Amino acid sequence: MRVFTALILVLFGVILLGGGIYLAVLGGSWYYIIAGLMLLVSGVLLLRRSIASLLVYAVLMLGTIIWAVWEVGTDFWALAPRLDVLGVLGLWMLIPAVTRGIEQPKLPSKWALSGMLAIAVVLMAVAIFNDPQQINGTMPTAQPSTAKAVDGVADADWPAYGRTQAGQRYSPLTQINDQNVKDLKVAWTFRTGDMKTANDSGETTNQVTPIKIGNNMYMCTTHQWLIALDPATGKEKWRFDPKLKADETFQHLTCRGVMYYDVANTAEFATSLQSQKSSSAECPRKVFLPVNDGRLIAVNADTGKKCSDFGDNGEVNLQKFMPYSYPGGYNPTSPGIVSGTTVVIAGSVTDNYSSKEPSGVIRGYDVNTGELSWAFDTGAQDPNALPGEGGTYEHNSPNAWAPLAYDAKLDLVYVPTGVGTPDIWGGDRSDLKERYANAVLAINASTGKIVWHFQTTHHDLWDMDVPSQPTLADVQDKTGQMRQAIYVTTKTGNVFVLDRRNGQAIVPITEKAVPQTVKRGPQTKGERYSATQPFSALDLAPQEKLQDKDMWGATMFDQMYCRAYFKSLNYDGIYTPPSENGTLVFPGNLGVFEWGGISVNPDRQVAVMNPIGLPFVTKLIPADPNRAETAKGAGTEQGVQPMYGVPYGVEIKAFLSPLGLPCKQPAWGYVAGVDLKTHQVVWKKRIGTIRDSLPNLMQLPAVKIGVPGLGGSISTAGNVMFVAATQDNYIRAFNVTNGEKLWEARLPAGGQATPMTYESNGKQYLVIMAGGHGSFGTKMGDYLVAYALPDSK
């Protein structure tokens, strides 16, 4: 046993010494060289039967403890890989089978090593109860006794994707509150029957947030089946199948939500005799269903039949006038908005496939007839110009794939845009093509004319789309003045707070210098970079800049690998240019905020959210400009992307260790609360465990670590925030005031969706789609799960 242990010490020493030398050459920490040498010495001494082996090991433990605390303080998960292997090996060295029969000098070597191990155990015990990343505060305002009513929206309903088209994701219901939420139980479960097939793309997901109006709930499935349910029981009333013919080339296969229109609620917006005449049309109440093959379908909300008087037998062809049109190339995945006269719809365009893709045009259609009212082509000289005979919209115009928001009083639709594809190289982009890229556009919903716009990233080379539905709220600033605000959440973590009437900043925005050069490898051919980028004073990014010490692993060995990997990449903070060598992108392609957005309680003037922070690696691949294109479509947003028509392809992947764990230390996911009067982060907590991220044989206790999530949060007047989204299959409730976790429930599949809540027959329900996410790696399913409080006895 002694010889075996000694050989392990020598082997570990050689690995650390070799890796440490490589890391030091890259400019990283010298710790691993020192640790490797001391392990070698300890191993050789143990082979020679010298008890001094334990003393050397004790000195190594002491030095490691001091070094670890100096680097990362008392962060449990950051300390773990620095101390776990040495701690376990140190305990092993103390067993009699290892020390029996070796020299026993006067120095108390065993006691020295035992003392160092005890210090390490105490340090880890203290660290597990002390999270330096956590912010513990209390929201300064209390919930008013009566929540303000929203015009045209019953308190019991959730009639739009964000409950209102303002995208607040806030309900005034209080039956479920911070005192009783712990008692929630499953009320009903509905299975759609729509599952991922072998022919579907890797980006097959279930991200729907159902809507509820009166006695009906409406939801769409992965393959865009539209289903009406009884909200009290979850029983199906009818379903409509659009006969989507999807395949593995679709980059996205998902439906985040549908739109509802009731002429009785919107007659005051009718501005023409035709609109008034249509109030008695075939479908006075209709559901608009976006379909991934490029259709918009109007369905009778009562019967589930297509509205034959809308468009062409109930359908509008969104591929009309599209350049380079192909199935899945223009893909409406998110709900648009519905005004009194117009349904406004946008869609995604295949990322990083080629420079000859469809347009990202945004369009408004007559809400009753389906006739095209206007178009806004983000890449055209005149964005409102309609194509003539044989003409098309501009190819590769910046698209708007996230949900839209709407202010009925201003009649403005707010459109979050991305960048014209290909995303990662932009040397051929004109100023015109980038004018409305990575921006929020305020467009008149009736005319399609732009009122103002604000760009959140200049000359985007990192896929920093505006990924979320903007949130509209009237907030009181520090001077007591009420401001008509729009909150624009971004992948960078910046939350731009603007006056939604004119786009002027409410929270300060500063243009800051950003990296301009590629320090490792050749310079990128034909590229240019923006000298500055806008930064908001409200920023939820996990940290400003990663360092060597922020690298992580399950053990000191893969942590050393991650440190070397980090040092080998181009990285000088956010907006480091893409490169042939490989560039670390942080915040990564998933962003700090994704399509889930934030939840704003306008009564309390507070917001809650679930930001994430996971680095990615982007590597440009020089390409033959004459290469032939393969079949259309990409099927995923990660891996090697061809970017036909530009000098490079690109490989995009998460920044992971050889064990498949993130190379950045936890946390990777949080919940947070913001005071909207001061726009300060009041509390911030980790969310989620790695319970469902490891094989069954490697299951660890469900200890909070802070994992990434895809999906948004909601909040209620009951002082409760609800969120699923995380890579572990849970839905959780948090106290809005202080972020305390109040409840959690196990889901039957991944909950990569935003929940919703409503009241039916006097009972409040919480609903979440548990359907999983193909490329995110969570368990796939078809479950719509509703929770409620038990009936009182």
Image (cartoon, helix red, strand yellow):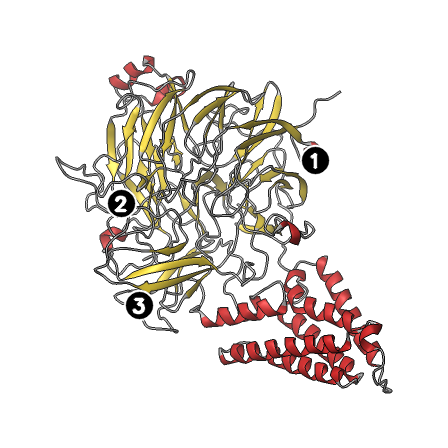
* Image position, residue 331 (x, y; %): 34, 39
What secondary structure is found at the residue carrying circle 2? Answer: loop
Q: Mark 1, mark 3: which one is toward the viewer?
A: 3
Numbered label attached to residue 667? none
Residue 182's label in the rendered image is 1
The foreground one among 767 and 191 is: 191
Residue that mark 3 sits on: 524
Q: CA distance from mark 1 to mark 3?
A: 55 Å
Q: Compare marks 1 and 3 and give the one earlier in the sequence.
A: 1
Alpha-carbon span between mark 2 and mark 3: 27 Å
Amino acid bearing label 2: Thr
Left or right for 418, reference 164: left
Please name which of the two marks, 2 or 3, marks the residue nearer to the observer: 3
Element assignment for label 1: helix
Q: Dots 2 and 3: beta carbons under 8 Å?
A: no
Q: Amino acid at mark 3?
A: Thr
Q: Which residue is mark 2?
A: 378
Coordinates of residue 333 in the picture (x, y in percent)? 39, 38
How far apart, in angstroms, are the residues tagged by discs 1 and 2?
A: 48 Å
Q: Nearer the viewer, residue 499 or 251?
A: 251
Answer with mark 1 or mark 2, whichever residue precedes in sequence: 1
Q: Quick check: can you spot residue 768? A: yes
Vertical arrangement, residue 466 with respect to residue 235, above or below:
below
Q: Quadrant of the N terminus?
A: bottom right
Is residue 231 depicted above or below 198 in this figure? above
Dots 1 and 2: beta carbons under 8 Å? no
- Check disc 2: other Cα within 10 Å, few if <14, some if 14-19, many if 20+: many
Mark 2 or 3, nearer chain start: 2
Q: Compared to 522, does 651 lie above or below?
A: above
Would residue 409 be seen by someone viewing this image from the given angle?
A: no
Residue 785 located left or right of residue 62: left
In x, y percent, where is residue 57? 74, 78
